[in-house]
Image: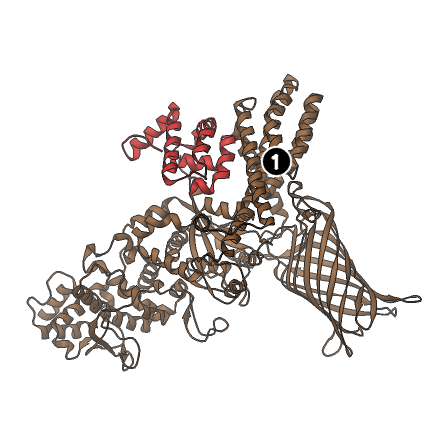
Chain colours: A brown, B red
Amino acid sequence: VRRLLALMAALGGALPVGAEVPLAERVAALESSYGVVLRSPASGDAALVTEVEAGLAALPPLLRRPPGGPLELELHAEPAPLGLGDGSKERPEWTEGRRRFHLYTYAPSEERRAIFRLSRLSDAEAERLWRRRAVVHAVMQRWDDARGWSKKDRWRRLNGWLSPFQRPLTFSEEALLHYAGAFSRARGQASASLDLVTFAEELFVPVESLRPEALAVDDQVRCQEMSKARALAELLAAESLGHLPPREPCPAFDAWADVENLSHFEVMMVASSGRQPESLFGHLLLRPVWREGAVPNGPGFTPVVQLVALTGLEGRGLDYMMKGLFGGFDIGFLTTTFGDMAHETLELEQRSVRRFRLNLTPVEQARMIERIWELERRGYFAYFFFTDNCASALLFLVNGVLEGEREVRPPGQLWVLPTAALDVLGRAQVVAPDGASQPLLEYIPDDFESTEARAERAWMAREEVLSELSPRLGSEARARLRLLHRRLGSPQPAVRRAAYERMPDVITQALRSVRPEDEEAARALLHAYVTWSVRVERGAVDRADGEKLAVEREQLIGLRTRLPTAAESLRDRQRLFEREDELQRRVAVLDRISLLREALAAAPRRPPTAKEALVLEQAVATEAAFVAVTEAQGALHEGVLASVDPMAFLAHEHQRKVEAEQAWAEGALMKSGAARMVLGAGVDFLAAGSARPVVVLRSAGLSESLGDARLHGFQSGSELRALEGELSLLPRKGLPRVLSSRLTLVGYRTLVRELPLHRHSLEDALGWGVAAQMETLREHAVPYRATAQAEVLVVVDEGARFRRFTALGAGAKVGMHWGGEVLAPVLGPRFALTHRTGLPGSLANAVRLEAEYAPFWRLGSGITHEATGTLQLDLRLGQVGRYRFLFTPRAQARWEGRFASRIEGTLERRLTLGVELH
Amino acid sequence: MFLRSRSHQLREDLALGAGPAVEDLASLARIPREHLGIFGRLLRAHRKELLELADARTLTPERAVKWLQRVGEIARTHPVLEEDGRAFLTLHEGGEPSP
């Protein structure tokens, strides 16, 4: 009893261990009280016994006796790094199952992650630390074996542990996060269980437990690994094995996170861009939003979480593409400011951002902000364009914070599209504060527009304002304003600049020409006219700036100036984030655009080509025009527009924008065009005059058509199709017969054209499209076809967001036809008509017409004429649960023939009714 | 970095006397939302001086600090904003107002 009391007191920290109790009694007490058996020579090593006692004392009382029977500790004379085994046969950690745990003579380690926070400890202190951690390791391993904590999602989701075969090509347990810094030491990377056990070592025996000043507060494990600490605490509490004390203040994190004022998180979808192939499918970001106090939050300074491939400043080329496709880059979690994101995305890349609110609980929000803090420092996994990208990183982040067993599963194993990730988040239901069910993801009708998108709106608004103004103005003032207006639409920045310089006079004269009773209304309209002009010019100058930056980058790379590789940049970043004080000093250099600009400013450049010189000249001239229009506006505000309240103007304009987006959202489909499936049935009318039934199955990895309105989808003016297939079957007794099939590998069409301001040539006024597809027409003499086509598109009529449009296309088609002992290249022109008319009700309701005439020349067969037409009705009707039906009755005709002495041809007609679930 | 990356937004907002860049500066200068209008008008009145000082071609860290100090000086020329600055410092720091 005396021995037991002595040990209990020592474990409680009340007595200096070893002062009064003989060593043998202490060893015996360890065995009798906790089942920890020290074998000779360990049992004779007083210092080791003391650390074993201290290690057990570091654990919550109910954990100190490990399950699974006696735990033997055996000390070996041969040295090992940290005095621990490494799992090898030569230096095992365990033998006899988990009965005997092996300790080795302590030797320093070279393992950076294990030692970089120990730099202020002496060698003797470090040895004591690792002896204590060894005991925690052994005990916690037993607990994990018995309770399976590391098998629980709550733990596995934090580092992304995958079980064998959980994903394709995953044959053994492995973690998504591969950076050693995400684990307490390298051994933790071997399995989820060792991850948990090695983390417990660090949590229960932190560096500061040896010497409080050995580590700055913000670098201590409790301030660095909040999610793991929380998960372990929850696992212990759930089994009534102890309550870990709540986290004490962490000054750096607490100041940044400001959890008390955290309002919510937004998922932001950056629109697709045809300028870079990797941005064709959009991009996702995350944004914490804080409640505002009396003082504005300063929108430009609030953080945005970028989920991006860390490509450094590597040039775009084949190597870049291969690395992006096959895991050559890492994906990381970067917090930048909203201002930096806006500059890069909305201004330089000209991509608008759609916003969605994540409906998390307050606890989940606190976890989310912790996870962001942690993952920015240690969250790195291999980037694969199709499967491990911004969308999968977002789901990884979200799943790490969801309470209970809730999980948002990836939309696919082979392709995780950003828009499809929004679909799965939108389908997940959560409980609102009032107890009602609500979707995890909700659209916020207030997009962040690119400055060019804003310029387009301003362009149209300016036309409307001019129409409203004209009747109020005197004839001379009206004529001057119209002349000014014409010049403001010039593609030449110098012409616009000269017009802006005259703008104050023209606006002042215009206002003086109105009747007194019209003056206030005219002043408001003229103010709007000037403001829209500033916005139009702003779009132009930002775009020119982006083009200038691209040219300067090309000049730099052309010289083969040594830039850090992605891997080097990554290593620098990981080192930078190891210590909070170092990070605070260098946080200013984490902005990528600034890095590029710094590199550009310092590096020698080759002279620009003639085309590049034109871009640079245009940028300078556009900048001058922007300066001129803002100076004109400033001058007018000091003059005749002084009484206009700009804040009220901005608030009113913002309200109008939100109302318009809300109205659009109410009619739009929520789901993106990812993973679509349509089942249809109908009748084929054959050339011979007979008819037969037909079943049509249409599916698509991604299919969004021109004019589509989808909350989770792309812009209405662009069409994107990938792996879109159609299979036509003849139902009959037994297996149905395949009549035809078509697979579009990829297809893209856009009707989005440049503003008149940017139309320097005919091509700037045209849309365009490309597609690659394969087709099988079983009843044709040469049934198999593979073709690629390209076209330019002329929009002859269009409504808002392309709900209504008519476009004519002209282009070419090339490819191969084979089958029936024929293998021949084909080529020919292609002419197309595309029309859409929106119908009342949902924005999905429409009549669509696609017509194509594509005569082709085939080697050995001469010229064949082919024309196809499809008239389709899209009707969103009915709802079952949360699914809505989209009915698509369709009439198709295909004529193929040859012009000889007379016209010979066949006409196939088909009527079908398709049904799609949304 | 702010002055470099937000130069176009800053120019646009200084011409109007309102906008996100003005709000950013108000947050730095601890100016309450209800006084944003006053702050925006003051900045608009001094826009030429501020834009010249923030010119990216001549911008240095020292010049950026000077720029922020100048914004603070401009704000303090208005009695309402001067009072806001004093109230903030009394509440949080106890000292002379600065941007």
Which chain letter matches label 1?
A: A
Q: Secondary structure at mark 1?
A: helix
- Percent across and percent down for residue A708 are 66, 52
Horizontal side of A778 relative to A714 (left or right) equals right
Residue matched to label 1: A494
Horizontal side of A138 relative to A623 (left or right) equals left
Q: For the image shown, how many numbered marks are present on the structure? A: 1
- Mark 1 neighbour class, 10 Å CA radius: few under 14, some 14 to 19, many 20 or more: some
Q: What kind of residue is marked 1? A: Ala
Q: Quadrant of the C terminus of chain A?
A: bottom right
Above or below, A514 against A830 in this view is: above
Q: Most extreme residue toward the top, as rendered?
A: A516
- Residue B18 shows in this picture: no
- Percent across and percent down for residue A358 are 48, 51
Above or below, A115 against A249 in this view is: below
Q: Nearer the viewer, residue A278 or A489?
A: A489
- Percent across and percent down for residue A627 are 54, 34
Q: Quadrant of the N terminus of chain A?
A: bottom left
Identified at 93% across, 66% down, the residue is A902
- Percent across and percent down for residue A555 are 52, 52
Q: Nearer the viewer, residue A514 or A369?
A: A514
Q: Most extreme residue toward the left, as rendered?
A: A20
- Residue A179 shows in this picture: yes
Q: Most extreme residue toward the front, as rendered?
A: A607
Horizontal side of B92 relative to A429 (left or right) equals left
**Quarter of image, res A661:** top right
